[in-house]
Amino acid sequence: MNKKTKIIDSLAIIGVGLIGGSIGMAAKARGLAGKVIGIGRDPAKLKRAQELAAVDVFTTDLINGAAEADMVIVCTPVLAVVPIIEAIAGSLKEGAIVTDVGSTKSQITRQAEAVLPDGRHFIGGHPMAGSEAEGVEAAVPYLFLDATYVVTPTENTHVKALDTLVRFAEGLGANVALMSPEQHDRSAAIISHLPHVISATLLKLASEEQADSGQVFQLAAGSFRDMTRISGSPPELWRDICLSSREAISDTIKRFEALLETVRAYIDSGDSEAIESLFFDAREIRARWIQEKDQRDDKP
């Protein structure tokens, strides 16, 4: 969707940082909303968001700011999403759509659907885009171009509201993927949450060895740097993600532990064929994934 196509009259973004700011910039640049309202706690940061064309107007009044919006996007840490929705629930206009951008969906969706009154619609969302950078200063209007934007409807989801959210996400330049909140959390635990756990744990292991030998980090180069890059992300963000999706992440860690035990058994027994097969399969799986991704990205 390259031409300007208005989807809604009024959009409220609660939390105008990297993701919220990028949504606002894209929505304004692409004409998806008649007005973009920024809502937050710090007037100086909100003023800066306005200067960067991430919002049209801003307010620190959560209740009144959300009251006029046709769509409210909550762009806060995951554990703050439901309390915010509880706070604004009574002030939302009839037909208002509420969504979020959190990387966990089951708990948020279940609780958010329960607190909204009739005629107000929650649909979970998770744009698979971002960086280690924080704040609206890092926001860009093209962040979602060709990115996957997961939308997680349930059996309770209002069909027209779902259509509006999908068209809005596509209007940002993203490719929408529909899946259940539970499937999202299982998938995200594997491709996003577990890598952060592994990165943090690997750094902990390296630090322990560094304390013993004093030489580990002297040897560390590209592969170690690449594997641990994501540990530059905000610790409180990943604390909240782990708490919000405990079941899915814990189950994924158990599955990973079982696979590691299998690999350890290969190494302990000197099974050269199994070891080589492991790395061969990994290379082939990655090559297929990259090829399929490139083919998707090349589609007009």
Image (cartoon, helix red, strand yellow):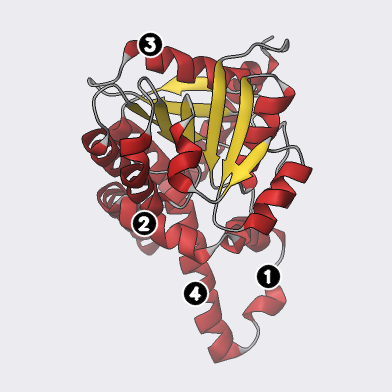
Q: Position of residue 4 (x, y in %)?
A: 71, 12
The residue located at (41%, 50%) in the rendering is 78
Above or below 131: residue 288: above
Q: Could you tell me if the residues under marks 3 and 2 are in contact, i.e. CB atoms within 8 Å? A: no
Q: Could you tell me if the residues under marks 2 and 4 are in contact, i.e. CB atoms within 8 Å? A: no
Pick the residue in front: 6 or 176. 6
Badge nearest the viewer, 1 or 4 = 4
The residue located at (69%, 35%) in the rendering is 56
- Would you name the residue on which mark 4 appears? 204
* Label 3 to label 1: alpha-carbon separation: 53 Å
- The quadrant of the picture occupied by the C terminus is top right
Instruction: Identify residue type, mark 2.
Output: Cys
Q: Which mark is residue 160?
A: 3
Instruction: Identify residue type, mark 1.
Output: Ala
Q: Mark 3 vs mark 1: which is more N-terminal?
A: 3
The residue located at (63%, 62%) in the rendering is 224
Instruction: Identify residue type, mark 3.
Output: Lys
* Label 3 to label 4: alpha-carbon separation: 48 Å
* Label 1 to label 4: alpha-carbon separation: 14 Å
The residue located at (50%, 83%) in the rendering is 208
